[in-house]
Amino acid sequence: MKVIVAAERSFAPGSRRIVAVGGRSIGVFRVGDRYFAIRNRCPHQGGPLCLGRLLDGAVSRAPGEASLRNATPMLACPWHGWEYELETGQSFMGPSSPGARSYPVTLEPGATLVAQLDAAGEERTPGPYVAETFDVFVEDDYVVLET
């Protein structure tokens, strides 16, 4: 199922949106020009994962040496600080730590979405009433979550 989250121009870099999809709460994040979606439930103890802070991955090759790696950001749960990679949901807290569910996010032209909605509407049976219609022009791209 595809869920339209927001118009790209209204989704600023560094921002997040939390959407409800089929009884699930899912956080959609924009980091630079990349989009990520992850379940808003920490597998550790059920905390609101997507309210946590984003972290750059830190690596250390030796004691006293640390640097930030240019990779997928991590999301830290606000309850206990457990960290999950935004792209995959992978936890790095231990070998048996469960990951969080991640979802694909795409950027799609509005015209494509309108065409998909029109195609889905062909399965309906027409009723006796017809409303006045108007032409619609779509000019923006939209952030779309796929569940």
Image (spheres, rainbow, N blue to C red):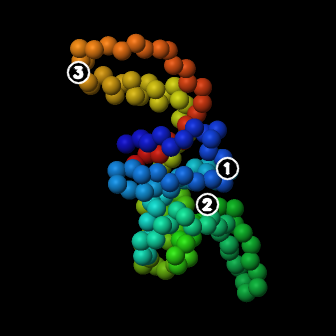
Whether residue 94 is visible here, answered yes or no, is yes
Q: Is mark 2 on a helix, strand or loop?
A: loop
The location of residue 41, given as percent across then percent down, is 44, 66
Q: What element carries label 1?
A: loop
Q: In this view, does 55 lie to the left or right of 134?
A: right
Badge 3: residue crowd in 10 Å (few <14, some 14–19, many ≥20): few
The location of residue 37, given as percent across then percent down, is 50, 54
Q: In this view, does 65 lie to the left or right of 16?
A: right
Which badge, 1 or 2, comes first in the chain's sequence?
Answer: 1
> CA separation, marks 2 and 3?
46 Å
Badge 1: residue crowd in 10 Å (few <14, some 14–19, many ≥20): some
> CA separation, marks 1 and 3?
42 Å
Residue 64, placed above or below residue 111:
below
Residue 54, placed above or below residue 37:
below
Whether residue 82 is visible here, answered yes or no, is no
Q: What element carries label 3?
A: loop
The location of residue 33, given as percent across then percent down, is 65, 47
Mark seen at residue 72: 2
Q: Name the residue under label 3.
A: 125
Say what amino acid the circle numbered 3 marks. Answer: Thr
Q: Residue at x 70, y 78 (%)?
A: 60
Say what amino acid the circle numbered 2 marks. Answer: Thr
Q: Is residue 34 left or right of residue 27?
A: right
> CA separation, marks 1 and 2?
15 Å
Q: Mark 1 points at which residue?
A: 13
In the rendered image, which quarter is residue 72 located in? bottom right
Which badge, 1 or 3, comes first in the chain's sequence?
Answer: 1
Quadrant in which the N terminus appears: top left
Q: Which residue is drawn at 50% across and 66% down?
A: 49
Q: Are marks 1 and 2 in contact (CB under 8 Å)?
A: no
